[in-house]
Amino acid sequence: MPAITLDALTRRFGERTAVNALTVDVPQGGVVGLVGPNGSGKSTLLRMLLGLVRPTSGQATVLGHPISAPARYLGRVGALVESPAFVPGLSARANLLSLAHLRGLPARRVDEVLETVGLTGRQREPVKRFSLGMKQRLGIAAALLPDPDLLLLDEPTNGLDPAGIVEVRRLLRDLGSSGRTVLVSSHLLAEIEAACDSLVVIRFGDLVYDGPTAGLLARGTSHVDVLPEHEADTAALQAVLRAAGWDVAATPAGVRVEGPDGVDGAAVNRAAAAGGVVLRSIVATRDSLEHVFLALTGSSDGELAAARTQAAPTTTPAPRSRR
């Protein structure tokens, strides 16, 4: 049974459609990235899953229970939505103890989650002394208190320094590999690429992609930049590579080789050697998740603004069939 199912789930605010007939199954276990441009409905979707916002139409389930009855599943869900709020004058440990008491959770969970997020040793300091990144880690600790089966995190790396981002990435992967389902939204696509097993990409409320991270990356293109040992061999190198069936163009870095089915650096090297050209360097490059994402959703603020204007108001299409 999927951890989350969405069936034509829709939420409108007046004439604006924030989430538009989404039909998605989120499998149990692993880390799932929820990505999209600002204003695409990511936070609205998370709020509907938590029972904070009612859908306009459609259905959804969380851990097998309908979102119309959140009390049935919220005890098994941990969440961090927007900036976490704590009592500034209390220590990190005291804040978590009060939350544990309110939820009827054992006090031992407090020390366990503090260690999990790397705040052991700082737990007795007042939260008002914490940096934004430390508060973010404390928020993740609060979400982990109930030892949840499902974890919903909205921008969990917000405010973290590079070392903190690496720690959170490792934490997310550990949580996913332990059997939990982690649904995380983020604008740091390099971190999403490194941490997530699968992706749900939405654009102004519409589903753009749903599937493995590797499947989306496969939509990107690759190229190889090569440089002959002797500059005089450049023209001969271009001719050899064109004869092998690749698209070839001169660049400041030497010769760029592209092909409709991708390019393999080793194959380029063999073709050059067969043509009597020795290469000085071979640099193979594949589109990053960020490049593929921008191709799907828009590459500039102006392009996104124009698309957002076209998308609103919008009518609800017929429900999509499940994959």
Image: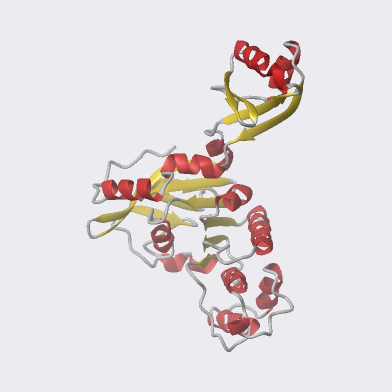
The residue closer to the viewer here, 104 or 237, is 237
Q: Residue furthest bottom?
A: 89
Along the horizontal axis of the image, is 268 left or right of 33? right
Rendered view: 105 above or below 248 = below
Rendered view: 246 above or below 193 = above
Residue 100: image x %, image y %?
58, 79
User: Residue at point 55% right, 61% down?
Assistant: 151
Q: Is residue 303 visible?
A: yes
Q: Residue furthest front?
A: 232
Display colour scheme: secondary structure
The residue closer to the viewer here, 82 or 49, is 82
Residue 156: image x %, image y %?
56, 63
Number of marks drawn? 0
Residue 99: image x %, image y %?
56, 80
**Quadrant into which the C terminus falls:** top left
Q: Quadrant of residue 90?
A: bottom right
User: Residue at point 65% right, 82% down?
Assistant: 93
Rendered view: 108 above or below 259 = below
Along the horizontal axis of the image, is 306 left or right of 207? left
Rendered view: 97 above or below 1 = below
The residue closer to the viewer here, 255 or 231, is 231
Along the horizontal axis of the image, is 53 left or right of 92? left
User: Residue at point 59% right, 30% down?
Assistant: 222
Q: Is residue 8 visible?
A: no
User: Residue at point 55% right, 64% down?
Assistant: 158
Residue 209: image x %, image y %?
45, 41
